Image: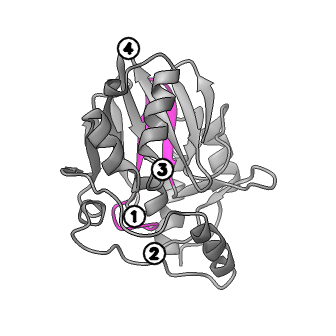
Amino acid sequence: MDVIELLPRLHLLRFPVGQAYLWRDGDELTLIDSGPAGSGAPIAEAVAALGRAPGAVRRIVLTHFHEDHAGGAGELAALTGAEVLAHRLDAPAVRGDVPGPPPVFEDWERPLYEQAARLLPQGDHARPAQVTELSGGDVLDVGGGAHVVHVPGHTPGSIALHLPEHGVLFTGDTVAASPVDGTVMPGVFNLDRAQVLTACRRLAELDADVACFGHGDPVLRQAAEALRGTITGDPA
């Protein structure tokens, strides 16, 4: 796992598949997504290496239920005592109460998905004992007020997290950046691509200077302009 400082209060945690983000408010830490199963201990070690006790992680906000983003949540919550939060439509899948709906693949996405799946741990993993359910419009006590934006399409309960006071937007997998040239684009492996395109346009309207994606390098300047300039498509 790579740990990269993006801003004095923000670090990127990069896994073989996907990535998470660590935000600092004083002595408190918030993790946005948790990496795949088995990531709990490495994340706790990374927090310690940054000079914080693992217990400083007070909450884990999951942008959606997919294993590369939520698989480490149960282990890390057990290690740190952190609260796990997810949208009410994805929370049952995060808890393991029900299987989450599978993506509706474009033909060209299938080999990419199979390649990514080979890099993820297989088998059962620890689930969070409790999941606090979120709804769009909720405001969390993070970064001066983190607005929960419900952006269904990648999954039913996909969310973005917007910190207006800092101009930071966490998009989850609704938006991604190309590993080839960094081009900002709609995410892949979606349940409903038309909804994703609508969600992308909604996120492009937010006031964000920094955009942090579930996959691909973040945009660290003029993120809203990058979103508006590169996300296109007709949801019809």
**Sooner in the amino-acid sequence: mark 3 or mark 2:** 3
**Magenta span contains residue 108:** no
Q: In terms of secondary structure, where does tag 1 sit?
A: loop
Is label 2 in contact with label 1 (beta carbons under 8 Å)? yes
Is label 1 in contact with label 4 (beta carbons under 8 Å)? no
Q: Quadrant of the N terminus?
A: top right
Report which residue position mark 3 lands on: 35
Report which residue position mark 1 lands on: 152
Residue 199 % position (x, y): 47, 59
Q: CA distance from mark 3 to mark 1?
A: 20 Å
Report which residue position mark 2 lands on: 191
Q: In terms of secondary structure, where does tag 3 sit?
A: loop
Residue 110 falls left or right of residue 65: right
Residue 29 % position (x, y): 38, 26
- The type of residue carrying mark 1 is Pro
Residue 42 % position (x, y): 49, 39
- Visible residue check, residue 206: no
- Visible residue check, residue 29: yes
Q: In terms of secondary structure, where does tag 2 sit?
A: loop
Query: Can you say whether 111 is above or below 156 in the image?
Result: below
